Image (tube, helix red, strand yellow):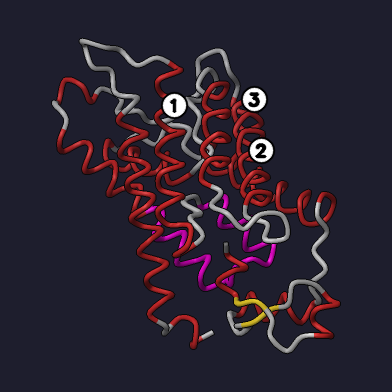
Amino acid sequence: MWKEVLSVTFYRAVFSEFLATSIYVFFGLGSVLPWPSALPTILQISITFNLAAATVVHIAWHVSGALLNPAVTLAFLLGSRISFARAACYMVAQLAGGIAGAATLYGVTPEEVHRSFGINTVRSNITSGQAVAVELILTFQLVLCYFASTDRHRNSNSPATFIGMSVALGHLIGIYFTGCSMNPARSFGPAVIVKRFSAHWIFWVGPMAGGMLAALIYNVVLSPDLKSLSQRLAILKGTLDMEAEDPEEAKQSAQPVSLTNVVQ
């Protein structure tokens, strides 16, 4: 574990998560602000979040895996894609990035435009249970897309386009219910800046549950993960630097794939 945590590449990856999340929140949240001359539309918001996600994933994918989202990070931890130390540091960096992005946007926009500052809220005719279920479903499809588009057995190219499309899909529906979070860091950042945490727990419970369910479905049902228990434990501890593509390769090759590629 210490070898991973003390490496320069580890902190480069953590900073990448901070930077990418702050950019994502700045542009995504900026599309929600109600400028008097042009009130935002659902299509505009969805496209902006789409482009923001695709852009930052393309920027950070080769550095950290571009997870950007505590729910995705938790899912990758459960799916034995990243170590516990990496997951914990990523989550802290993502939350800090969400705050930084929201704070920067707050500082450069006129006060009359702030209003609720784009915080996620549950619509008046939606119950808390319905809101949690919607956030779970929205995040479920996003995390499934993350797993599928970063699966090295299927694709070695940047997943930016597919992840951006998944983010847009969630917003086209989710805005009607909760404003569409799918990402606790996106909800946490503006909530901290304006100090409003009404029903904030929904935007943690729903996405985190959706991420865990997606990790289970993808790695057990859709694309069974054949790692051994010892391999999984080594990945979680951050002590596995090299991993084979599959059990047969593990027997035949002494040159497995690096943990960096597992993240990607």
Q: Give, as a single range, the part of the protein colored magenta.
A: 70-95
Q: Is residue 39 above or below residue 84?
A: above
Could you tell me if the residues under marks 2 and 3 are in contact, i.e. CB atoms within 8 Å? no
Badge number at residue 130: 3
Q: Is residue 247 above or below residue 163?
A: below
| Frontmost residue, 77 versus 194 | 77
Select label 3 or label 1 by which is in front.
1
Q: Secondary structure at mark 1?
A: helix
Predominant SS along the magenta part:
helix
Three-letter residue code for mark 1: Ile
In the visual, does 193 lie left or right of 143? Answer: left
Residue indicated by mark 1: 47
Select label 1 or label 2 by which is in front.
1
Taking the magenta stretch, the answer to whether it contains residue 82 is yes
Taking the magenta stretch, the answer to whether it contains residue 254 is no
In the visual, does 159 lie left or right of 59? Answer: right
Which is nearer the N-term, disc 3 or disc 1? Answer: 1
Residue shown at 29%/28% (left/top)? 117
Neighbourhood count class around disc 2 (C-alpha, 10 Å): few under 14, some 14–19, many 20 upward = some
Residue 219 lies in quadrant: bottom right
Three-letter residue code for mark 3: Gln
Residue indicated by mark 2: 141
Could you tell me if the residues under marks 1 and 2 are in contact, i.e. CB atoms within 8 Å? no
